[in-house]
Amino acid sequence: MATKGNNTSLAVDSRSQIGTTSANALRKAGKVPAVLFGHGVDPMAVSLDAKAFDDLLHAGGKNRLLHITIDGSKKDTALVREVQRDPITRRVVHADLQRVSESETVSASLPLVTVGVADGVRNMGCVMDVVVHTLEVEGPANEIPPNIEIDVTELGMHDHLTAGDVKLPPNFKLRVDPATILISIEPSKTEQQMAEAAVAVAEPVEVPTVAETTPTEELPES
């Protein structure tokens, strides 16, 4: 496996046996069962080297165009579309790869990476709430960036940043409502609770009084 720019090469092997027993045997041998599909071609059952694939994912390969070599000779290009992990060990147990051409327009879910410290956090005791962690975009398959960086330095108290505020790479466009809030800067709960407590102390407390009553006039004895 080798990486160059936004393109990543990955070797896969075709497999004729499918099913749970075969998949478990592959995993014990350090392989990951996978499926290569798309472009109107029948899905192909393949296997990947588990360590090489895991290294690729950690290097941001999930959003990069893969240059695939099948059985050591046949070439193809694809994107990682789904990765299934064991809920306990977090090891990859299955993957779906979609065939795409290099210049094909595709959709991608890109991680959001914040840059800097928001003014509201640094100087006003606020907290930054990342409402959305990934951004849905579409663009050329061979130009997909590993993530989207957002500068939050100028955000103050009660400020927020929407999808429409994000500067996308050339040839890319949003696949979500531009008004979607991605990040907001709000007072911390501790600060809010202290402010509410201060207001409560400052407000006068009304003490209920016993209503005055007029004694009932005694009637004369008959």
Image (cartoon, rainbow, N blue to C red):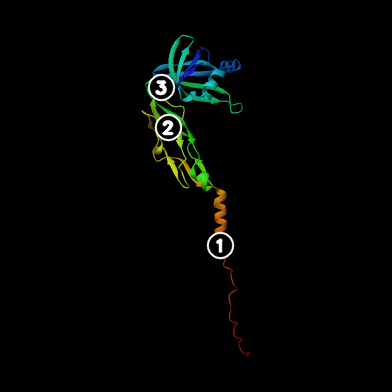
User: Residue at 56% across / 52% down in the picture?
Assistant: 193
Mark 1 or mark 3: whose residue is earlier in sequence = 3
Q: In this view, does 106 lie to the left or right of 89?
A: left
Residue 142: give its label.
3
Which type of secondary structure does the marked residue at label 1 adopt?
helix
Query: Which one is in front, 114 or 61?
Result: 114
Tell me if residue 47 can be seen.
Answer: yes
Which type of secondary structure does the marked residue at label 2 adopt?
strand
Residue 136: give its label.
2
Q: Is residue 211 left or right of residue 138?
A: right
Task: Please state, as top left, top right, bottom left or bottom right, where the C terminus lies in the image.
Answer: bottom right
Outermost residue, left side: 171
Mark 2 or mark 1: whose residue is earlier in sequence = 2
Q: How far apart are marks 1 and 3 (CA)?
A: 62 Å
Residue 34: percent from left, percent from top? 51, 19
Q: Which amino acid, by three-letter code, is at mark 2? A: Glu
Mark 2 or mark 3: whose residue is earlier in sequence = 2
Q: Which amino acid, by three-letter code, is at mark 1? A: Ala
As drawn, 71 above or below 128: above
